[in-house]
Image: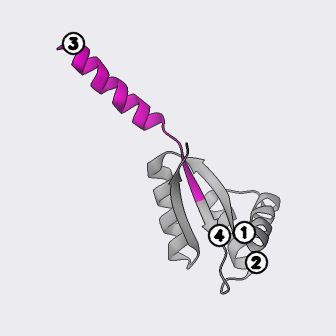
Amino acid sequence: MAQIQLEEDLEIVIENDKQFALILYNDDVNTFDHVINCLVRICHHQVSQAEQCANIVHYKGKCQVNNGSLEEMQKQCTALLDQKLSAKIEDKK
């Protein structure tokens, strides 16, 4: 019984420590300024970091713009989607 509880507790801790990646995708609609402003406001980037991510998205099609807990990445992803940006969360392996 104690072994089963320990394993369940361990699974919960591992799930809570799991990191998720927030990926931003290129589109033909949003301006660089809009993307940069969203990354600064929503993902807490410095302006230079947001500019670099915007360029990577533009030239490579996507860029990991943040990582963290599932809950935090869901909040940021939803906020980016609300701003009409294309984003999704991926499990970091």
Q: Pick whichever, 66 or 48, lies toward us.
A: 66
Quadrant (top left, top right, bottom left, bottom right) of the C terminus: top right
Tag 3: Cα neighbours inside 10 Å, few (<14), some, or many (≥20)?
Answer: few
Residue 42, position as x, y percentages in the image: 60, 63
> Could you give the CA–CA distance between mark 4 and mark 3, rounded to whole angstroms?
48 Å
Q: How far apart are marks 2 and 1 (CA)?
A: 10 Å
User: Any magenta on residue 27?
Assistant: no
Q: Which one is earlier in the sequence, the residue at label 4 or at label 3?
A: 3
The residue that label 4 is drawn on is 38
What residue lies at 76% left-to-right and 57% top-to-bottom? 46
What range is drawn magenta here?
Answer: 1-22
- Residue that label 2 marks: 32
Tell me the SS state at disc 1: helix
In front of the other: 57 or 66: 57
Local packing at callout 4 (Cα closer than 10 Å; few below 14, some 14-19, many 20+) is: some
In front of the other: label 2 or label 1?
Answer: 1
**Mark 3 near mark 1, Cβ–Cβ under 8 Å?**
no
Kind of residue indicated by mark 1: Val
Q: Which residue is drawn at 36% across and 24% down?
A: 10
- The verdict on residue 12 being magenta is yes
Instruction: Please identify the residue farthest to the bottom as the structure is shown.
Output: 29
Closer to the eye: label 3 or 2:
3
Residue occupying the point 62% across, 66% down: 24
Label of residue 2 in the image: 3
The residues bearing labels 4 and 1 have C-alpha atoms spaced at a distance of 14 Å
